[in-house]
Image (spheres, rainbow, N blue to C red):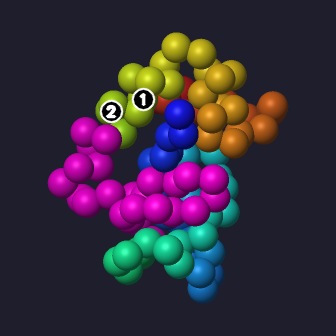
Amino acid sequence: MCLGIPGQITEIDGSEATAEFWDVEKTVRIDIVDEDVEVGDYILNHAGFAIRKIPDDEVEETMEIYESFLEGDEDEALEEIGGGPDEQLGIGGD
């Protein structure tokens, strides 16, 4: 099963953006999202593509759900979001 990972857009450069996923920054393509994406917006990322903008009224609940998934095994969670071996997740104020 493939999973889209939520992240917050921190910078935009044309059709690419930098997004933060629990303190891990990655470059994502934003040109297939069907609505405008701005800095501060949350998106679902799959394989380096923002596939959906998360509506503002769904961000908090979405992040809580994903954080509950990631709390078990930090190494597995980092692998899922594409983090490197020296990175750590910023979950729960870590």
Residues rendered magenta in the picture: 39-62
Tags 2 and 1 touching, CB below 8 Å? yes
Vertical placement of residue 28 versus 62, above or below? below
Residue 75 belongs to the span the image colors magenta? no
- Residue at image x 31%, y 41%? 62
**At 62% across and 75% down in the image, what residue appears?**
16
Residue highlighted by disc 1? 67
* The image quarter in which residue 26 lies: bottom right
Residue 63 appears in view: yes
> Which is more toward the observer, 93 or 38?
38
- Look at mark 2 in the image and give the residue it sits on: 64
Instruction: Specify the quadrant that holds the C terminus.
Output: top right
Residue 76, relative to residue 87: is it above or below? above
Q: Residue at x 78, y 38 (%)?
A: 84
Secondary element at image label 2: helix
Q: Give SS at disc 1.
A: helix
Q: Position of residue 10 (x, y in %)?
A: 53, 65
Amino acid type of disc 1? Answer: Glu
Q: Indicate whether residue 44 is drawn in magenta.
A: yes
- Residue count near mark 2 (Cα–Cα under 10 Å), binned few <14, some 14–19, many ≥20: few
In-image side of 53 versus 84 (left or right): left
Residue 48 image position (x, y, % from top left)? 64, 58
* Residue 85, quarter of picture: top right
* x and y, in percent, of residue 17 in the image: 59, 71
The residue depicted at 53 percent of the width and 78 percent of the height is 31
Q: Most extreme residue toward the top, as rendered? A: 72
